[in-house]
Image (cartoon, rainbow, N blue to C red):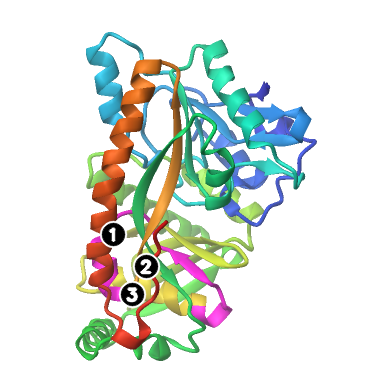
């Protein structure tokens, strides 16, 4: 297995897949604009497997920030036993807790056993504590799982388009009380004379970007953190991924109040970054959820992933959906312990998913299937 310290060196394999977060333009924007490498704790370590014409978006990590599959407890257990957990290897889209492909290849005949062995062996050779394959899709999960990986599940809340013709059609599938609550919520925004604008990447002005970035960093500041992506990187993405980005902006009397940046592909909408300068009841739900749903319906997109966490999404028609990651640790004892941990964790998650499913707002005739294994 060969490794590359820049995505620009990956010339033999096409990166023009529809999934926006592994496009060459997205990764290059992060590399070239001070988001990864340097002292970021993310070191580019793209892995090539020539025998399968395969590229893996891999990074050597010296911490666990920006991953959203939380392994701080594992790192603490290592420390208590006097063992180094970092550096470790992850295969992921940086700063992006969004399910998607992780195997970048032009080949249709992929050997999961060879990939697994090569990755795990690479960790031993490079002195890495393990490899973590984050937010993989179900096809890659099934391809790799039986080759000495432990499967870890998490739950996000996703919206699915059941061939809705309009937002009203979508709401018609709700129980009456739930439907009225959303209509009342949206009416507050209308009565406050808040204007909602959807901008393509080409329509986003310099002032829009400055406002968005202020909101983006403010959202992280409230959590005592700093945003991972620089303004230059966002602008580079917009310049090179103009079909993949939209900005939804809320304003009052020509003054911006809030905004949310979305990415998209041919079938999916991804809500990624939100912020506001004034807390207004219902504004977050309008900009981050209802406008996204309307966009999906209007443009025929099948699926909307609005981001991580947030049980408040359930009452708005977002279904509890499993996400998957695969884990291998080079220390045999800890590898076995993690295997036991994720099995027990999965049992609790199954109960949690069922409870969330039962809280969905749909009437009995329109309940979607439970999205479990």
Task: Report x, y in % for residue 178.
Answer: 23, 83
Bin the neighbour count of mark 2 within 10 Å (Cα to Cα): few under 14, some 14-19, many 20 and up.
few
> Is residue 351 found left or right of 28 in the rendered image?
left
Q: Residue at x 30, y 23 (%)?
A: 75
Q: Please say whether residue 277 is visible from this viewpoint.
A: no
Q: Residue at x 76, y 39 (%)?
A: 13
- The quarter of the image holding the C terminus is bottom left
- Say how many tags the image has: 3
- The picture quadrant where one finds residue 144 is top right
Task: Report x, y in % for residue 356.
Answer: 25, 64
- The quarter of the image holding the N terminus is top right
Q: Which one is earlier in the sequence, the residue at label 2 or at label 3? A: 3
Query: Could you say which is closer to the camera, residue 231 or residue 359?
Result: 359
Q: Secondary structure at mark 1?
A: helix
> Is residue 225 found left or right of 96 in the rendered image?
left
Q: Farthest front residue?
A: 146
> Which residue, given by chain and number where applicable, does mark 2 sit on?
370
Task: Report x, y in % for residue 7.
Answer: 66, 34
> Is residue 306 found left or right of 57 in the rendered image?
left
């Amino acid at each position: 297995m060969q490794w590359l310290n820049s995505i620009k060196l990956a010339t033999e394999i096409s990166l023009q897949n529809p999934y926006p977060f592994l496009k060459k333009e997205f990764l290059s924007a992060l590399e070239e604009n001070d988001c990864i490498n340097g002292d970021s704790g993310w070191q580019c370590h793209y892995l090539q497997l020539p025998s399968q014409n395969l590229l893996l978006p891999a990074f050597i990590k010296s911490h666990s920030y920006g991953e959203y599959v939380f392994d701080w407890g594992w790192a603490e257990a290592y420390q208590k036993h006097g063992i180094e957990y970092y550096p470790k290897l992850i295969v992921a889209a940086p700063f992006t807790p969004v399910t998607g492909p992780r195997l970048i290849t032009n080949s249709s005949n992929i050997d999961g056993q060879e990939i697994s062995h090569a990755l795990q062996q690479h960790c031993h050779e490079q002195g890495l504590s393990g490899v973590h394959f984050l937010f993989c899709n179900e096809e890659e999960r099934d391809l790799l799982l039986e080759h000495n990986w432990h499967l870890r599940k998490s739950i996000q809340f996703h919206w699915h388009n059941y061939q809705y013709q309009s937002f009203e059609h979508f709401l018609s599938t709700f129980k009456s009380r739930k439907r009225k609550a959303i209509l009342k919520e949206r009416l507050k925004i209308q009565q406050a004379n808040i204007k909602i604008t959807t901008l393509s990447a080409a329509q986003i002005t310099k002032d829009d970007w400055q406002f968005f970035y202020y909101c983006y960093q403010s959202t992280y500041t409230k959590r005592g953190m700093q945003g991972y992506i620089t303004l230059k990187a966002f602008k580079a993405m917009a310049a090179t991924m103009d079909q993949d980005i939209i900005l939804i902006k809320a304003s009052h009397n020509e003054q911006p109040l809030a905004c949310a940046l979305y990415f998209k592909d041919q079938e999916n909408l991804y809500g990624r970054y939100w912020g506001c300068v004034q807390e207004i009841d219902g504004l977050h739900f309008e900009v981050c959820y209802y406008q996204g749903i309307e966009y999906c319906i209007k443009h025929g997109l099948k699926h909307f992933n609005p981001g991580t966490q947030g049980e408040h999404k359930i009452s708005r028609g977002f279904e509890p959906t499993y996400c998957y990651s695969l884990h291998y640790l080079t220390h045999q004892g800890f590898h076995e312990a993690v295997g036991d941990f994720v099995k027990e964790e999965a049992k609790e998650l199954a109960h949690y998913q069922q409870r969330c499913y039962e809280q969905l707002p749909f009437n009995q005739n329109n309940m979607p299937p439970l999205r479990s294994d």
